[in-house]
Amino acid sequence: MHLARRLLPAALVSTLLPISAHAFEISTGYDGLNDPRTSIKGLSRVYFGHDMGHGISFGQSIYSAAKGDGGGAFFWGVEGVKRFALTDRLSVHGSLFLGGGGGAAVVVGNGFMTRVGLGLGYALSDRLDAELGASYIDIDGADIENSAINAGLTWHIGARPDQTARTGSALAMPLRSVSMRATYMDMGNSRDRTGAKQSSLKLAGVESSFLLGQNNELVLGTDGAASGGEGYMQIMGSLRHRISLGQRVSVYGQGGIGFGGGGLVDTGGGTLVSADLGMSIALLPWADLDLSVGKTVAPSGDMNGTIARVNLTRVFRRAIDEPSVSNHPQRWIYSLGISSQQPNSDFRKAGAPGSGHPVMQESSVDMFLTDNLYATGNAQTALGGEVAGYAIGMIGLGWRQPIADRWAVSLEGRVGAAGGGGVDVAGGVIGSVAAEVDYALTDQVYVSMGVGKIKALKGGGMAPTTVTAGLKFPFTTH
């Protein structure tokens, strides 16, 4: 475990080594624990990684309870995968995950997680691999030191310039859009984990949509509770079918599966299923307003929610056979780092154990709206400091100002949701300000240092000062 902690900074660096911005893979799978000794019987996995060539990919994964009664336990971190081709279609792969998390009252203390995996892959098509293997999982602060059997799928959504499919065409799954979204979830007669009536949830989140074909999309979304379920979080993957009704209006239907929990919301083992109907209205060639209604249900829990959702969407490409809506490339910066929080006197809830300084891993994605102004999304989870399960998600705006040949400063303001780990977030709604200084090691990698302040916005509770160090990876899409 101590060796794994020492390896984490190197793993963070590895995810940002110079690579093509167009070669990615998404994996999803399930680890069934052998002889489990906690309420978590199995974990779902979602991995998004950069294909670096030579069978190597690095990126980030999130693991969540998916079987048993541990819905709400999340573990997020970095992961590396190495594949060796055995034949044209058959391969063997190994993987290493280092991260942290907790939740569902299963993890006490730090929540640092290590997972080592080994398995076989079979190419079902040019883009899709089926995988079967075994893993060993260790979670600090939980009675989880188990081997597991796993199965999953890996979708290759891009290609290096020299990489083509067996048909001779480049692999591709273009980014259609990104959205900020707000959701109201009426819980009806649902009961929480204490047996009390479940309050309705107000959620804030983000989503990305990728074009699968002429009318189909893969949609990835995540939401956190701003009201009604302090600490609740969900991650969903959906298939969407869209029908155009003219130049400015389209309708869509989608079905999804994912995982979620926390905030005493009874999601059972953590697996969620959803179905939605919606309408998109083009406000500008590159901006849509999306309105939708639907259902989200936990098959093994008591959660049964009816949702109404509004999205503000930045569109990059409306159809797979159409050009980008803009002639200008879209600039992005992906950030990965570690931060330390200096807790204030009211940081922890009354009676909550622990007194350490939380150490968080965090990731951000910045989407530039002008040369200097950008929209940002930030996610954090605990690696140490006796706050297992403490997690943060925020969105906001920032301004990046070059000040010398290789130097730049950034200022950000963000709002979002937080919860878990015994931290007093006063209902869940938080705000933050941050200042960062960046130095460009190369055109592709910046080193960054920053300070900031996070505060519960409903009064009282947590208000830590933060110090952050990490790396930033700028790239463009067309």
Image: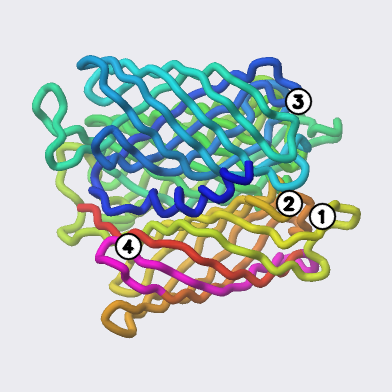
Residue 48 appears at what percent x and percent y? 40, 39
- Tell me which residue sits at (16%, 27%) in the image: 165
Please state which amino acid type lies under the numbered disc 3. Answer: Thr
* Way the structure is coloured: rainbow
Residue 5 appears at what percent x and percent y? 58, 48
- The region drawn magenta spans 438-461
Label 4 or label 1, whichever comes before in sequence order: 1
Say which mark, if any, is on residue 38: 3
Measured in 3D between alpha carbons, the distance from the residue under mark 3 to the one under mark 1, in whole angstroms, is 22 Å
Q: Secondary structure at mark 3?
A: loop
Measured in 3D between alpha carbons, the distance from the residue under mark 4 to the one under mark 1, in whole angstroms, is 36 Å
Q: Label 4 crowding class (10 Å Cα cut-off): few <14, some 14-19, many 20+? A: many
Measured in 3D between alpha carbons, the distance from the residue under mark 2 to the one under mark 4, in whole angstroms, is 31 Å
Measured in 3D between alpha carbons, the distance from the residue under mark 3 to the one under mark 4, in whole angstroms, is 41 Å
Say which mark, if any, is on residue 445: 4
- The residue where tag 2 is placed is 387
Q: Secondary structure at mark 2?
A: loop
- The residue where tag 1 is placed is 354
Label 1 or label 2, whichever comes before in sequence order: 1
